[in-house]
């Protein structure tokens, strides 16, 4: 058996898993298992997911965030994930990058949302160096004042997770399933979805973005490639993920409550 080689031996070890088209619910289950059951650092890169799927934060309310009638009519799946953050619709045009770390993995990083966001933006500034006008604006990654990356986090006693959905490209029709949220970032300035977001494809090749993200991560961690089979050490009975699909009955109840 070949043992994966690592680089930058003096840096903290981070396991790297790369997927193409992994269903987003399966990705979320893997992430939650690694956050709660592992004691190692992880980076997960998933190049797109399968069918268009709406993903809501753990406290998101469908009636406030979704055009529920359209979602039900078109049978668009809706997931409530285990982390906070906003609502996105993801598909093959979305690239996902996740960091799961022990609290001491990044020197001098305070395990709170804003410091973690600041750290992640400094890492991505290496990825986008000389490309576009990249900034962290409130909790979003933007070029200028157009969003292309949305973030979500969860922080436990000893570990944290930071995951990002990057809009490589998007289907205009899909955006119609999302309402303008009541709690929108100030820089959005009441713009519609289509005026607010932009596509990463207009700035760099897709494979280049993912490769540069791995390279930027290697400046802070010693990366070790890992296959999915290597983490399947816990049976389903030992780990019960909280990310799940919302049922039609739940969405219908939210629609009725909205009408009343």
Image: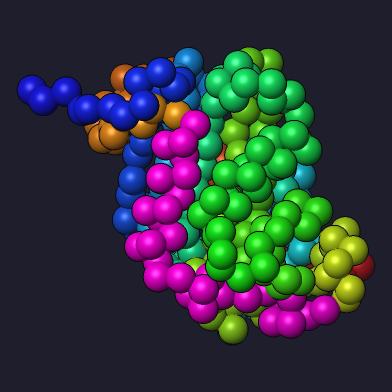
Residue 192: within the magenta? yes
| Left or right: 204, with 225 as reference point | right
Is 4 placed above or below 88 here?
A: above
In-image side of 203 versus 135 (left or right):
left
User: Does 42 appear in magenta?
Assistant: no
Q: Of all residues shown, which one is farthest toward the front?
A: 130
Say which residue appears at 75% left-offset and 34% top-offset: 115
Q: Can residue 23 be seen at all in this image of the molecule?
A: no
Q: Position of residue 18 (x, y in %)?
A: 33, 45
Residue under the point 90% across and 63% down: 186
Q: Position of residue 53 (x, y in %)?
A: 53, 63
Who's the residue at 32% across and 56% down the image? Answer: 20
Q: Is residue 201 visible?
A: yes
Residue 164 appears at what percent x and percent y? 58, 51
Q: How many marks?
A: 0
Q: Quadrant of residue 208?
A: bottom left
Q: Is residue 78 above or below residue 38?
A: below
The N terminus lies in quadrant: top left
**Camera-nearest residue between 232 and 260:** 232
For this view, does 168 lie left or right of residue 253?
left
Colour theme: rainbow
Seen from the viewer's position, the closer of residues 112 and 56 is: 112
Bounds of the magenta segment: 191-220
Q: Looking at the picture, does residue 136 appear above or below residue 37? A: below
- Image height check: is 198 above or below 97? below
Q: Which residue is at the far left?
A: 1
Q: Can you give x and y, in whole percent of width and height, for residue 224 in the image? A: 31, 29
Looking at the rendering, in which quadrant would you find the C terminus?
bottom right
| Dominant SS in magenta | helix
């Amino acid at each position: 058996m070949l043992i994966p080689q690592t680089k930058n031996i003096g840096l903290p070890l981070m396991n790297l898993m790369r997927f193409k088209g992994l269903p987003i619910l399966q990705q979320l289950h893997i992430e939650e298992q690694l956050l709660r059951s592992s004691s190692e650092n992880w980076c997960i890169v998933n190049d797109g997911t399968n069918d268009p799927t709406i993903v809501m934060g753990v406290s998101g309310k469908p009636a406030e965030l979704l055009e529920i009638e359209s979602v039900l009519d078109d049978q668009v799946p809706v997931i409530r994930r285990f982390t906070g953050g906003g609502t996105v619709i993801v598909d093959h045009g979305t690239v996902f990058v996740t960091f799961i770390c022990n609290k001491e993995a990044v020197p001098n990083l305070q395990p709170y949302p804003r410091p973690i966001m600041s750290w992640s933006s400094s890492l991505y500034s290496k990825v986008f160096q000389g490309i576009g006008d990249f900034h962290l604006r409130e909790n979003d990654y933007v070029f200028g004042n157009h969003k292309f990356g949305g973030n979500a986090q969860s922080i436990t006693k000893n570990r944290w997770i930071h995951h990002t959905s990057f809009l490589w490209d998007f289907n205009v029709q899909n955006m119609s399933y999302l309402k303008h949220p009541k709690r929108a970032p100030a820089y959005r300035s009441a713009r519609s979805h289509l005026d607010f977001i932009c596509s990463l494809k207009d700035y760099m090749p897709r494979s280049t973005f993912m490769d540069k993200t791995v390279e930027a991560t290697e400046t802070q961690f010693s990366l070790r490639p890992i296959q999915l089979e290597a983490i399947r050490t816990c049976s389903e009975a030992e780990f019960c993920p909280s990310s799940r699909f919302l049922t039609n009955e739940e969405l219908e109840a939210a629609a009725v409550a909205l009408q009343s």
